[in-house]
Amino acid sequence: MDDYTWRRRLAARRRRRRNERLFMLGVFVAVMTGLFLYFAVYTKTPEYAMRQMISAYREGDAETFRRHIDLNSITPKAYDDLTSDLFKYDTNLTDRERSLFENFYVLIRRQMCEGAVEVLNHYIDEREWILPGGILKGRQLGIDYDLLLDRSLIRHTALIDLEGVEHHGDEATASFSIVEEYSQAPFVLKVTLKDQANESFNIGGKEFDIFGRTFKFPGITFNLSGSDWKVVSVDNYREYLDAVSPILRKNLAEYIDATDEIVRRYNATFANAQDVFISLQRSPYGIMTTNQRTETAAFITDTVIAALEARQEELDQVPVPQGAQFLAGLRQESTRITIQAWQSYIKGITENSAADLDTAAGLHKQELVIDQRVEEIIHNSAVARNVPELP
């Protein structure tokens, strides 16, 4: 090999090694830049916060999920959206009563929102839906909170994925794909995010005029010193209710119509049974005789309970549209508790057991609450008939 050829090969080898070093340096710089952008920039963005929130929701990480949502800020506007037409379909109210109740719901806004936060916090922690306590327990405010939760759609709305995030200076708007599980109606829910650390930076996302044409460059919001991005409001919750509620109301109306004949027929049966039951307990001494107790127990078993079971069996044969699942479930629960109440009553009168009679009375109260809820659903009632006194 001559000297010229050797020098050319040596130069080529040096160039190859230099290129390899430059390539490795480029890879190193790219990796370090990527790591810097991820940890110093991306992890401070609302996109990252929302991805974390979705992962936490799916994995049951309550602490991380709660870190990215401000329930105290969300609930007031959501409450206003939910109650804006709450009385529109209530066939039991006059115009004056409707106005009275609308004003009443404004007065109890704070208590209702506090109850919603309590319910949502418990669900985030335990994945279990409860009803609030305190002043909202039962019907102290003339409100069935369970029915209100059902109308809010929150218990049967599934989060699918994050669609995207738009930046607006110190705020951002995130879009989530969701689906209402009863109707299977899809929807894109938009929420407003704020960096509550209040030290965010925004790059881009602005319009520029170049040669007479307007251009908008994509923007990104981040905070090098830390961020606290949280959902502070649901922007189109009312639109979601307007999109889904008519479907559910249609399903509900179809189911009510389909079961109307069954309910009317058995209501007549139970009305007659009530007259017989009252006559069986009449006694000149105010205390039922042993024979009366035996006859009453047999009548309850053979007529009342048998009719309850027969009615529920007929109701179960009727196809239940998805939007009527809540009502169908309440009817099943009412039948179950009513039968238990009568069985406890039978045991109480045949065995002279005060404890069983108390159990029967307690179960009967539960049944009355459920039956009232059923009637409110059927008549589109929003509240009890009388506005209670605020404590």
Image (cartoon, rainbow, N blue to C red):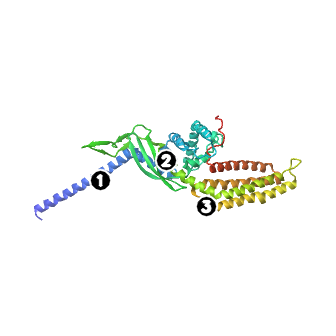
Say which quadrant the N terminus sits in: bottom left
Name the residue: 68% across, 61% down. 314
Q: Give the Cα distance between marks 2 and 3.
A: 29 Å
Disc 2: which residue: 239
**The residue positioned farthest toward the bottom in the image shown:** 1
Disc on res. 27: 1
> For this rendering, which residue is in front, 301 or 278?
278
**The residue positioned farthest toward the top in the image shown:** 391
> For this rendering, which residue is in front, 349 or 78?
78
Q: Quadrant of residue 318?
A: bottom right
Name the residue: 19% across, 56% down. 15
Q: Give the Cα distance between marks 3 and 1.
A: 63 Å
Give the left or right position of residue 47, taking residue 384 as reference. Answer: left
Give the left or right position of residue 227, taking residue 361 as reference. Answer: left
Disc on res. 316: none
* Residues packed near mark 3 inside 10 Å, few (<14), some (14 to 19) or many (20 plus): few
Identified by mark 2, the residue type is: Glu
**Marked residue nearer the N-terminal end (1 or 2):** 1
Question: Which one is closest to the eye, mark 1 or mark 2?
Answer: 2
Disc on res. 319: 3
Q: Quadrant of residue 212?
A: top left
Identified by mark 1, the residue type is: Val
Task: Say which element carries label 3.
Answer: loop
Query: Where does residue 357 sit, x and y in percent of width and height?
Result: 78, 49
* Residues packed near mark 1 inside 10 Å, few (<14), some (14 to 19) or many (20 plus): few
**Marked residue nearer the N-terminal end (2 or 3):** 2
